[in-house]
Amino acid sequence: MTSFLPASFFEQLRTLVGHDHVHTEGDLSLWEQDWRGLAQGKALAVVSPASTSEVAAVVKLCAEAKAQGAAISIVPQGGNTGLVLGSIPDGSGTQVVLSLRRMQTIRGIDPHNLSMTVDAGCILQNLQEAAKSAGLLFPLSLAAQGSCVIGGNLATNAGGTQVVRYGNARELCIGLEVVLADGRIWNGLSGLRKDNTGYDLRNLIIGSEGTLGIITGATLKLYPQPAARACAWLATPSLHHAVELLALSQKHLASGLTGFEAMEQAALQLVEKHMPQLRMPIAPTTAEVFVLLEYSDDESETRAQSRLESLLEAAFEAGVLTDGAVAQSLDQSQRMWDIREHIPLAQAQEGVHLKHDISVTSSSIPAFVERAKAQLQESHPDARVINFGHLGDGNLHFNVQAPLGADPKAFVKELAQPIQAIIYDTVAFFGGSFSAEHGVGTLKPAELLHYKDPVALSLMRSIKQALDPHSLLNPNAVLPPAADAQAGEAA
């Protein structure tokens, strides 16, 4: 492979998408650097198409250049809010960043089919608001919803705070429009809930992180807006009690349970330290674990409050609660969610730290946390575990902060690998996943090689070879390059 590019390559790009939408010089950090500032690459060009046909033309041009011997590949990019470095270029200067941010059209809302069809570059919050204006609900909810885009949400199969009721992004998608590695367009924007006519191509593309095709449009599921929501901030003695509370909540609230977030004391103390303006409903020192519970009711505010009060009465009687505060208004509910969503920001203010986005079955969470903490205590007794997450669906953000007074950067640099090994080995012991909702990207391919079933890896490589034989699309993400894979397998 040579670095040869046709002399007219950049001019052809400008002809396809417009002169102002191809960037090769100047400050490109908006596209070249991940939002946490962990890494910055070097793009050959940043190209911003405005339509599916323009995306297809750009991909076809790059594929032709690669066929002629150019060392070129494409990194699709949405809002660039990912956490695994899957949407930024490497340092080679040979990768085209294909940004979808200009593609922000809501193509249509079908209230009778409870669906909406949208461009991949639509900001998630804008979709939520568009659905709401039609009297409907699009329930995908993430901390980054003001800047992340739906194409990226689908490409990474994003999770969020309402998975316990509505599922991941995959469960909220009915159809896709995708540009393939050779520039062909697959139009799968069907609004059908039932279609048993072959392989499920939609779910193959969702979660593939831009390695099999570039999502340019999607048809999404909508739901009726709930008549009422009720939130409660609950104190429990331990994670064991929190899991028992989850079972009670599922029994009493059934499908109305839309959020069940757990936060250990240390996580809330960081919020209290760095965001004192966020007043805690209950002092963090009064319990080991706190739960933020949300219930949505289809009938009335009165019934919502009644069912929630019935749950809390049963929970107190069962001894799984020590205290509780029920939001009396939407404003109070939002303040509870603000506290939960500020935990990552409080961690960032405390200093760089080790993030772990893991999942085990909800029933295994107490045993997992107990085992992982014991092993960390044995090897790194002063390290601080900041544990919080979506207990309702088994997803924890089991993060590790430097000891008080230590240099956070030095701590992360020295101990990232041994601490990660402890946590991921413990996750594997419980049959869990080292990446619950953030994906693999270019940050975790080595972990995929180490922990993924070999047969699954073989199938994944076969699919990649079939759909992208020349490895044009995001070649460093998810599946490592062949040489790295062979080295990992040999080890």
Image (tube, rainbow, N blue to C red):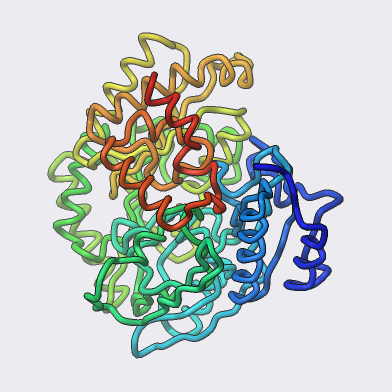
Q: Residue 29, relative to residue 355: is it above or below?
A: below
Q: Position of residue 167 (x, y in %)?
A: 32, 60
Residue at 63% from the left image edge and 40% from the top image edge = 36
Q: Residue at x 47, y 35 (%)?
A: 482
- The answer to whether residue 428 shows anywhere in this view is yes
In the picture, the quarter occupied by the C terminus is top left
Q: Quadrant of residue 362?
A: top left
* Of 103 and 254, the residue lying toward us: 103
Give the residue displayed 75% in from the left and 66% down from the top. Answer: 13
Quarter of the image for the N terminus: give it. Answer: top right
Residue 165, given in percent of the width and then of the height, sits at 29, 61
Tally of numbered tags: 0
Residue ranking furthest to the front? 68
Along the line of sight, the residue nearer the viewer: 390 or 240: 390
Q: Is residue 160 visible?
A: no
Q: Which is more toward the observer, 366 or 69?
A: 69
Residue at point 34%, 54% (across, down): 232
Report x, y in % for residue 388: 40, 38
Residue 167 located left or right of residue 240: right
The furthest residue to the bottom: 112
Above or below for 321 versus 224: above
Residue 406 versus residue 32 in the image, above or below: above
Q: Is residue 6 left or right of residue 253?
A: right
Task: Name above or below for residue 373 compared with residue 457.
Answer: above
